[in-house]
Image (cartoon, coloured by chain):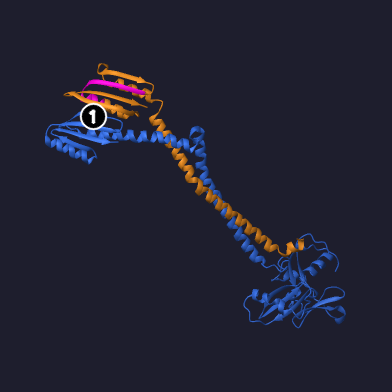
């Protein structure tokens, strides 16, 4: 074959000298099952010292098996000036068996023709001198079940599986990263707020200092609120029949003496004081209420 | 690893890279999650502590309290104020001859100012006449 110059990606059709073809009737459902036994089917047909790749597809009721040596194909492609990365798909001439019922001339010395359903390459001299050669118009033929250079290299994973799994894992990766970023940003707002607060109050940076300041002001807050609440409660005990006689607040005790107009009011004040958790005692018309803070 | 081997296992390599990417994403998410769990509560607690301290300090040791306690001098007539000593952050005041209404007004003013009431004595000396003395600080 003459050397060629290829600029774009191309698809190639292998002639029979590059592959070994067999057709088998097997009770199999899936092509991966068929591919699993491919190597054993070719035991008697190919040189076991060389490394072969296998391709299989269903042709009518049978399975069409191809064994080929990708390195051999690559060497050939290189010899004719075709870089392997330019080859997008590889097909087998066998896939054109119906189109090759009438022979086509490959070169001056060889022709390609389907004989008994198998595409075969023949020397031109075997043909009658008056043989009319067909012209193969590849544009009108739709080829399927081609293989890519990568997939032809005995990959454990097919191209389709690679695309599906890679997309899935990439998508998972993106989701994880987005979720991680979202989580981190959820804390960054609080972090900025804390930084701003610490910038304003540098003294509060240490937890020991914070506990110390809290330890000082929290009891003041609790005690003073309790004192004020107690004073309000005492004022509610007073009415037209009861007057404040004295009130004392010491460090943590509030004592009030309430003078009432009669015993009934005294008892009423005592009861109301007890309901408000005061320690109360009545002495005639005088009621003493007391609460510890 | 020559080019042929790379080409041979191209699919596996691509898949392996995508698995590594997913794994990296998972580790990143997990570390972000642990970081957030570990730090969010801590940060929020710190913020709440600082806010609480600021608010308590402003309330019970604010700069305006000294001005606010001056009001206690004007609530009742000056002849009813026996003494009104404000020194540093402490106030000692004595009132006498207060009516019930004045006592009420004065007490209300006092409890509405954020000072620590250290001591408070209210005594009825006659019908509708009270004395009041208190010590407060801030």
- Residue at image position (84%, 80%) is A131
Q: Could you say which quadrant of the image residue A111 lies in?
A: bottom right
Residue B97 drawn in magenta: yes
Expressed as whole percent of the image width and height from the top left, the position of residue A210 reads 46, 36
Q: Nearer the viewer, residue A227 or A16?
A: A227
Expressed as whole percent of the image width and height from the top left, the position of residue B123 reads 21, 25
Q: Could you say which quadrant of the image residue A263 lies in?
A: top left
Quadrant location of the N terminus of chain B in the rendered image:
bottom right
Q: Is residue A231 visible?
A: no
Q: Seen from this angle, which residue lies furthest top?
A: B79
Q: Which residue, given by chain and number where applicable, does mark 1 sit on?
A: A247
Q: Chain of mark 1?
A: A
Q: Nearer the viewer, residue A148 or A95?
A: A148
In this rendering, position of residue A166 left or right of residue A193: right
- Residue at image position (18%, 36%) is A281
Q: Is residue A223 visible?
A: yes
Residue A171 drawn in magenta: no
In this rendering, position of residue A77 left or right of residue B113: right
Within 10 Å of disc 1 (Cα), the crowding (few <14, some 14-19, many 20+) is: many
Q: Nearer the viewer, residue B134 or A57?
A: B134
Colour blue belongs to chain: A
Q: Which region of the structure is painted magenta?
A: B90-105
- Residue at image position (77%, 63%) is A84
Quadrant location of the C terminus of chain B in the rendered image:
top left
Q: Could you say which quadrant of the image residue B103 lies in?
A: top left
In this rendering, position of residue A257 left or right of residue A207: left
Q: Answer above or below: position of B21 versus A156.
A: above
In this rendering, position of residue A136 left or right of residue B43: right
Expressed as whole percent of the image width and height from the top left, the position of residue A191 reads 52, 41
Expressed as whole percent of the image width and height from the top left, the position of residue B13 reads 68, 61
Colour orange belongs to chain: B
Q: Answer above or below: position of B99 versus A118.
A: above
């Amino acid at each position: 074959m003459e050397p060629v110059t290829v600029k774009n990606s191309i698809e190639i059709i292998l002639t029979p000298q590059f592959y070994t073809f067999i057709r088998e009737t097997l009770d199999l459902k899936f092509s991966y099952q068929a591919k699993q036994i491919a190597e054993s089917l070719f035991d008697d047909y190919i040189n076991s010292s060389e490394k072969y790749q296998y391709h299989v597809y269903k042709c009518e009721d049978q399975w069409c098996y191809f064994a080929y040596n990708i390195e051999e194909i690559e060497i050939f492609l290189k010899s004719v000036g075709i870089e392997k990365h330019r080859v997008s798909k590889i097909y087998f001439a066998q896939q054109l068996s119906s189109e090759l019922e009438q022979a086509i001339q490959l070169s001056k010395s060889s022709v390609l023709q389907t004989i008994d359903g198998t595409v075969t390459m023949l020397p031109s001299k075997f043909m009658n001198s008056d043989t009319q050669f067909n012209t193969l118009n590849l544009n009108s033929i739709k080829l399927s079940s081609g293989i890519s250079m990568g997939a032809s290299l005995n990959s454990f994973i097919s191209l389709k599986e690679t695309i599906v799994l890679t997309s899935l894992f990439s998508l998972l990766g993106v989701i994880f990263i987005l979720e991680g970023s979202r989580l981190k940003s959820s804390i960054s707002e609080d972090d900025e707020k804390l930084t701003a607060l610490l910038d304003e109050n540098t003294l509060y940076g240490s937890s020991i200092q914070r506990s110390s300041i809290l330890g000082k002001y929290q009891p003041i807050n609790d005690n003073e609120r309790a004192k004020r609440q107690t004073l309000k409660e005492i004022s509610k005990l007073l009415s037209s029949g009861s007057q404040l006689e004295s009130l004392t607040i010491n460090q943590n005790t509030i004592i009030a003496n309430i003078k009432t107009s009669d015993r009934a009011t005294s008892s009423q004040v005592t009861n109301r004081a007890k309901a408000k958790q005061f320690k109360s005692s009545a002495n005639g018309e005088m009621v003493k209420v007391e609460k510890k803070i | 690893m020559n080019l042929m081997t790379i080409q041979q296992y191209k699919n596996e390599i691509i898949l392996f890279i995508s698995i590594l990417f997913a794994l990296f994403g998972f580790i990143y998410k997990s570390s972000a999650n642990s970081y957030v769990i570990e730090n969010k509560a801590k940060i929020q607690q710190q913020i709440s502590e600082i806010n609480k301290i600021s608010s308590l300090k402003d309330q019970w040791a604010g700069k305006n309290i000294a001005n606010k306690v001056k009001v206690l001098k004007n609530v009742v007539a000056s002849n009813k104020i026996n003494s009104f000593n404000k020194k540093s952050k402490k106030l000692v005041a004595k009132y006498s001859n207060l009516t019930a209404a004045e006592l009420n007004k004065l007490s209300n003013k006092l409890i509405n100012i954020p000072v620590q009431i250290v001591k408070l004595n209210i005594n009825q000396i006659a019908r509708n006449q009270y004395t009041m003395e208190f010590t407060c600080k801030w």
